[in-house]
Image (cartoon, rainbow, N blue to C red):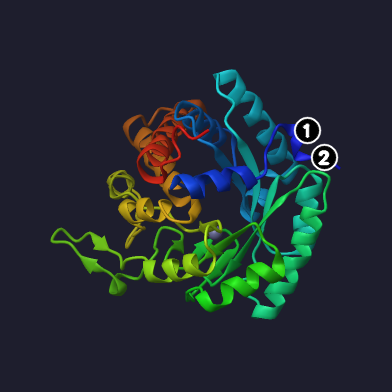
């Protein structure tokens, strides 16, 4: 048994309370390796932003859960060394079973998501409630995120072909019965770099896809029913066209890439949305820089010489998100 407090981590209780009140969202960035984690910590220290470090099923498979937990502990120490002790949460992204959530809670995670959104409603309630009861009964309270509604797209092991918007009439009952600390909802965001099919989008004169807007009417309806309750948006990368262009210029192929425009996320962050998950944009930033190095310096074979620029670009991207999109800069 390791408690997250021993690792210097925090749960999300105070962070989301402040975020809802302050009209901003806390970044939830996924990490799988050292360079990503360094970029996240550097960006959040420099912008003085709280941060949620997310571990997905894919990350656990790739990097090993124990490794990731020690890396999160390292992130806490690294932030201190950089000169600013930003609050850091270690969060399980898309937990799919009670056993997995329990295991993470017992090994130092300060927050978990139990994603029962693909189950029938009553089963989602029962599973989520079971995780909440376990998480909240720990010596150090672990926070739990539940989900209602299904996001389309592919993210590691989570995939769905069609989305279902969250039904506002279910949210009060779900929160009351399960006791969750926050709720992920589906209002049109989507996992991955192809968030919409081209036929769902309009096109600019130079062929850039413009996605349909998020369903702010559903968000407002949910806020009315759960005043001040912390809401989470998954699949909220913007898929910057600059990165797609660099990747394609240097030999990649990412047809039909489309994300959520930043001004819509900025609008969401001002509402009860207090946690915004961004993963694909980081993947694009790193890939763009690595491809550029490989193409411009074909004789380069030192991993530090291509992972380094990738890390620098990722840091720049995350600083931009904290400052310009989520509004979390200066809130640590
Ligand atoms: Zn997600």
Specify few, some or many for label 1: CA neighbours under 10 Å numbering under 14, 14-19, or 20 or more. Answer: few
Name the one closer to the observer, 33 or 119: 119
Q: What x and y, as percent, mark residue 157? A: 60, 62
**80 vs 228: above or below:** above
Q: How many marks?
A: 2
Q: Quadrant of residue 320?
A: top left
**Pointer 1 residue:** 6
Using residue 263 as the reference point, say whether residue 7 is left or right of it: right
Q: What x and y, as percent, mark residue 202? A: 23, 69
Name the one closer to the observer, 242 or 87: 87
Give me the residue at 38% from left, 54% from top: 265
Say which quadrant the N terminus sits in.
top right
**Pointer 2 residue:** 2
Q: What x and y, as percent, mark residue 93? A: 62, 54
Q: Quadrant of residue 8?
A: top right
**188 vs 50: above or below:** below
Q: What x and y, as percent, mark residue 59? A: 63, 49
Using residue 209 as the reference point, say whether residue 5 is left or right of it: right
Give me the residue at 69% from left, 79% from top: 122
Q: Secondary structure at mark 2?
A: loop
Using residue 255 as the reference point, say whether residue 287 is left or right of it: right
């Amino acid at each position: 048994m390791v408690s997250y407090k021993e690792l210097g981590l925090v749960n999300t209780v105070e962070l989301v309370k402040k975020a809802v009140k302050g009209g901003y969202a806390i970044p939830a960035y996924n990490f799988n390796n050292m360079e990503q984690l360094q970029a996240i910590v550097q960006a959040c220290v420099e912008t003085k932003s709280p941060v949620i470090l997310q571990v997905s099923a894919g990350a656990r498979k790739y990097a090993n859960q124990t490794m990731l937990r020690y890396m999160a502990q390292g992130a806490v120490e690294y932030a201190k060394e950089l000169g600013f002790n930003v609050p850091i949460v270690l969060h399980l992204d898309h937990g799919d079973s009670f056993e997995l959530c329990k295991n993470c809670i017992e090994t130092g995670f300060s927050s978990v998501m139990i994603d029962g959104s693909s189950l029938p409603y009553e089963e989602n309630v029962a599973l989520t409630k079971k995780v909440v009861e376990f998480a909240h009964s720990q010596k150090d309270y672990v926070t739990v995120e539940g989900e209602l509604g299904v996001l389309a797209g592919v993210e590691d092991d989570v995939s769905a072909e069609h989305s279902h918007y969250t039904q506002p009439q279910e949210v009060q009952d779900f929160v009351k019965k399960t006791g969750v600390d926050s709720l992920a909802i589906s209002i049109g965001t989507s996992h991955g770099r192809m968030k919409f099919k081209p036929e769902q989008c309009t096109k600019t004169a130079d062929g850039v896809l413009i996605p349909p807007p998020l369903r702010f009417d559903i968000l407002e309806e949910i806020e009315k029913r759960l005043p001040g309750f912390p809401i989470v948006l998954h699949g909220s990368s913007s898929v910057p066209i600059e990165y797609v262009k660099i990747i394609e210029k240097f030999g990649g192929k990412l047809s039909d890439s489309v994300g959520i425009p930043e001004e819509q996320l900025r609008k969401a962050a001002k509402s009860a949305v207090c946690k915004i998950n961004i993963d694909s944009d980081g993947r694009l930033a790193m890939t763009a820089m690595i491809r550029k190095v490989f193409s411009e310096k074909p004789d380069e074979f030192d991993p530090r010489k291509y992972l380094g620029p990738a890390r620098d670009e990722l840091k720049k991207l995350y600083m931009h998100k904290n400052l310009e999109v989520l509004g979390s800069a200066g809130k640590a």
